[in-house]
């Protein structure tokens, strides 16, 4: 099993693109280039990326998790396929994908609302046209989440739309609507779309992904690996970039797009501000890459994210592989500082190995911080803020963000793909991780050191490509401290996801 192609738990998702400048490329169409459909990796353990951040790409991302086959309608009705094949490529190469998904969440938290739970059924319809004159195509996506079990008076789950009165409501929203232009390897994508970058991403671990109103110029930088596992850099284009402006966000538990400034301030300001984004990746050789990202949040804060990684064969036949990665984050307030004033940094190290179906890694992060000034003028201990996506720390776990300032985080991660043991177990995957955060006590807070243990079991049904079941459990414990009640968190999640290409 290749480390680059392995997948990692507990947030199961294809994160092999994570170090790259992400820019989603529209498939050229099942009839034009059938191999352009991307198939989900067979393993769940990516040694590079934090477990829970993987929801950003593929956990429930049915429209880009294509089984490698024609659409249901065109296969069932050959006359329809024959007719479509006579049309202009703009229509002939269109993709229409139905994604059916269901999720059940139950969180027991002794510190706040004792119980938060919901069960939802929904999915998405995604349409992507072919290319008009090999220059322009359109896309749209409709998303829905409907409560099968939605008790009132409990905590929020974000599976549905949570209201202040602690009621949960269904979600029905046109989340994507974009036009995309291309010239050679360059792409210009405008309006409401998906983004997958370290600090602005889908955070797709619920029913609805986070979506963005954005205006993005970039390069098509990743090619599907024909061996079937993950991605490799295009050797013809070792330097790739992405740049643009992101103005609004549709949150996972919402039905409306709002300015990024409203998300960052939790709707405490009416100021309308967005983020200028830029990313650059240099891949001098396959398996080696370095990237740098810049996020300038107007009158909010500026974030710089850098990462370098390398993977290598340990034995001669390449069965045993090693990987090493480092990351650095710098974040500080800018302009009117409508979110608060602070400066924080993060460093991270990752070392891992993989052999056939097994993969494991050791990880370390340290979150620097200091005394900042909150919106109310009070002193506060600020860690890295990540309001527009999942925090990209190597040790980001399922429940806890791991972004507290003045904290050292240690993690051990492992997974196994049972297909390596027997073909009878094809599609069965297991992963686990344990992270511990040692949090320094200060004048602003007590010792809140904690540990989180996560396990995930996933089964992809070989006979029904695009269908998988997943069960996940997380348990969080906090260190005792004098004079204070220490909470415990138990988090349980069940998923079902079925992706059906229609055209």
Image: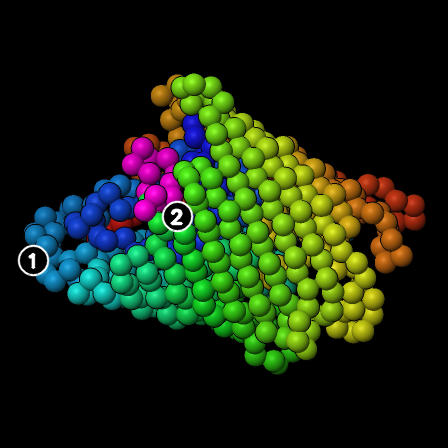
Quadrant of residue 150 within the rendered picture: bottom right
Residue at horizontal 75 percent and vertical 60 percent from the top: 382
Quadrant of residue 479 within the rendered picture: top right
First along the sequence among labels 1 and 2: 1
Q: Nearer the viewer, residue 302 or 9?
A: 302
On the rendered structure, is 127 left or right of 444? left
Label ID, residue 434: none
Which of discs 1 and 2 lies nearer the camera? The answer is 2
Q: Residue furthest front?
A: 284
Q: Quadrant of the N terminus?
A: top left
Q: Is residue 277 visible?
A: yes
Q: Position of residue 23 (x, y in %)?
A: 40, 56
Label ID, residue 238: 2
- Examine the residues drawn in magenta and state their main secondary structure: loop
Residue at horizontal 20 percent and vertical 62 percent from the top: 134
Magenta stretch, residue numbers = 224-236
Where is 492 relative to 165, above or below? Answer: above
Quadrant of residue 156 within the rendered picture: bottom right
Separation of marks 1 and 2 at Cα, in angstroms: 37 Å
- Residue 421: in magenta span: no
Q: Position of residue 498 (x, y in %)?
A: 36, 45
Q: Residue furthest bottom?
A: 270
Residue at horizontal 16 percent and vertical 45 percent from the top: 75
Q: Position of residue 133 (x, y in %)?
A: 17, 65
What residue is shown with label 1?
86
């Amino acid at each position: 099993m290749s480390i680059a192609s392995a997948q990692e738990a507990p947030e199961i998702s294809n994160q092999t693109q994570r170090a790259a400048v992400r820019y989603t490329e529209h498939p050229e169409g099942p009839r034009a280039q059938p191999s352009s459909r991307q198939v989900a990796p067979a393993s769940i353990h990516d040694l590079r990326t934090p477990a829970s951040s993987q929801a950003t790409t593929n956990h429930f991302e049915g429209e880009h998790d294509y089984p490698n086959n024609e659409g249901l309608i065109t296969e069932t009705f050959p006359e329809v396929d024959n007719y479509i094949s006579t049309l202009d490529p703009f229509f002939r190469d269109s993709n229409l994908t139905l994604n059916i998904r269901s999720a059940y969440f139950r969180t027991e938290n002794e510190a706040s609302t004792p119980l938060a739970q919901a069960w939802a059924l929904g999915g998405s319809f995604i349409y992507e046209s072919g290319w008009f004159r090999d220059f322009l195509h359109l896309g749209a996506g409709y998303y829905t989440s409907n409560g099968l079990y939605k008790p009132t008076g409990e905590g929020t789950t974000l599976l549905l739309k949570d209201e202040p009165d602690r009621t949960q409501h269904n979600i029905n929203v046109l989340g994507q609507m974009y036009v995309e232009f291309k010239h050679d390897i360059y792409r210009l994508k405008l309006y409401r779309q998906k983004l997958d970058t370290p600090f602005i991403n889908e955070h797709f671990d619920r029913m609805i992904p986070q979506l963005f109103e954005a205006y993005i110029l970039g390069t098509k930088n990743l090619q599907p690996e024909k061996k079937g596992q993950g991605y490799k850099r295009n050797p013809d284009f070792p330097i790739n970039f992405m740049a643009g402006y992101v103005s609004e966000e549709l949150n996972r538990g919402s039905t409306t797009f709002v300015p990024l400034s409203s998300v960052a301030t939790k709707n405490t300001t009416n100021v309308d501000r967005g983020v200028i984004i830029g990313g650059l990746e240099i891949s001098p050789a396959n398996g080696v890459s370095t990237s740098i990202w810049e996020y300038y949040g107007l009158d909010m804060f500026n974030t710089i994210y850098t990462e370098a990684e390398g993977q290598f064969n340990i034995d001669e036949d390449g069965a045993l592989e090693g990987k090493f990665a480092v990351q650095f984050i710098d974040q500080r307030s800018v302009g009117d500082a409508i979110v608060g004033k602070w400066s924080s940094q993060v460093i991270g190290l990752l070392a891992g190995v993989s052999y056939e179906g097994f993969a494991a890694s050791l990880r370390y992060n340290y979150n620097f911080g200091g005394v900042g000034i909150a919106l109310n003028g009070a002193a506060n201990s600020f860690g890295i803020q990540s309001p527009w996506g999942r925090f990209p720390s190597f040790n980001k776990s399922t429940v806890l963000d791991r972004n507290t300032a003045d904290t050292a985080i240690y993690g051990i991660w492992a997974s196994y793909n049972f297909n390596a043991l027997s073909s009878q177990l094809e599609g069965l995957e297991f992963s686990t991780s344990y992270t511990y955060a040692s949090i320094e006590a200060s004048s602003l807070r007590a010792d809140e050191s904690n540990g989180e243990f996560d396990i995930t079991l996933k089964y992809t049904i070989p006979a029904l490509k695009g269908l998988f079941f997943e069960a996940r459990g997380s348990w969080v414990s906090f260190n005792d401290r004098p004079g204070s009640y220490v909470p415990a968190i138990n988090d349980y999640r069940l998923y079902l996801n079925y992706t059906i290409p229609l055209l």
